[in-house]
Amino acid sequence: MVEPSRALAMEDRKPPKPFPWATAIVAAAIIIIAVLALVAYLKTGREVKAIVSAVARNFKTGKITHTFRESIPRIASTQGDVLELAVSQSDESFKRSDEKRIGWDYIYWGTTVVEIRVPVTFRYHLRLSDAWRLAARDHV
C-alpha cells in the first residue's frame, strides 16, 4: 500500500513536455537563410571584396631593390695583327635585396641580399689582315 503523502507527491509530478520540434526547425531555417544571405552579400559586395583583398595583400609585404654598378678603372692599347684601339676593364656588379615583413608590416622577417660581381673586359679593335678599301674625296 502507498502512503498518502507519497501518493500526493506522485500526482504532483507532471509528465515532461515534448521537445518543440516546430520551433527548432523554424529557428534552423532562419539561421540557414541568414547565412545564405550573408554569403550572397559577400560574393556580390564590391566593398567587402576590396576590403578583404586589401587586408590579404597588406598582411605580407616586401620591398625588392635592384642595384647596378659599373666602373672603368683602366684603358690601354696593344700591338699585333689586330689593331686594338682600346681595352676597357671594369668590374660590374648586380645586386638584389628582398625585405620580408608579415602582419601588416609589424613583424620583420629579415632581408635577403644577393650580389654578383664580374670582371669585364671590352676590346675595341680593327683587323689589319682584312681587306681595306680606301677612297679619296676632295683631294683627301
Image: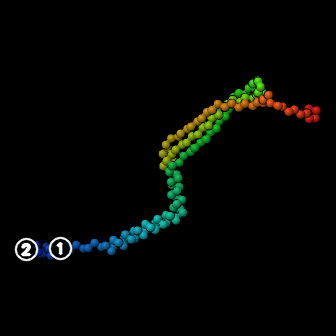
Measured as percent of width and height from the top left, residue 84 is found at: 76, 28
User: Mark 1 is on which residue type?
Assistant: Arg
Check the image and name the residue furthest to the right: 139
Measured as percent of width and height from the top left, residue 92 is found at: 65, 34
Q: Is residue 45 left or right of residue 75?
A: left
In depth, the one of 32 and 3 nearer the eye is 32
Residue at 44% over, 67% down: 36
Check the image and name the residue furthest to the left: 1
Q: Quadrant of residue 119?
A: top right
Judge whether residue 104 can be spotted in this image.
no
User: Mark 2 is on which residue type?
Assistant: Val
> Tag 2 or tag 1, which sits nearer the N-term?
2
Disc 1/disc 2 C-alpha distance (Å): 16 Å
Measured as percent of width and height from the top left, residue 66 is found at: 61, 41
Disc assigned to residue 2: 2
Does dot 2 land on a helix, a strand or a loop? Answer: loop
Does dot 1 land on a helix, a strand or a loop? Answer: loop
Measured as percent of width and height from the top left, residue 13 is found at: 17, 73
> Which quarter of the figure is the N terminus placed in?
bottom left
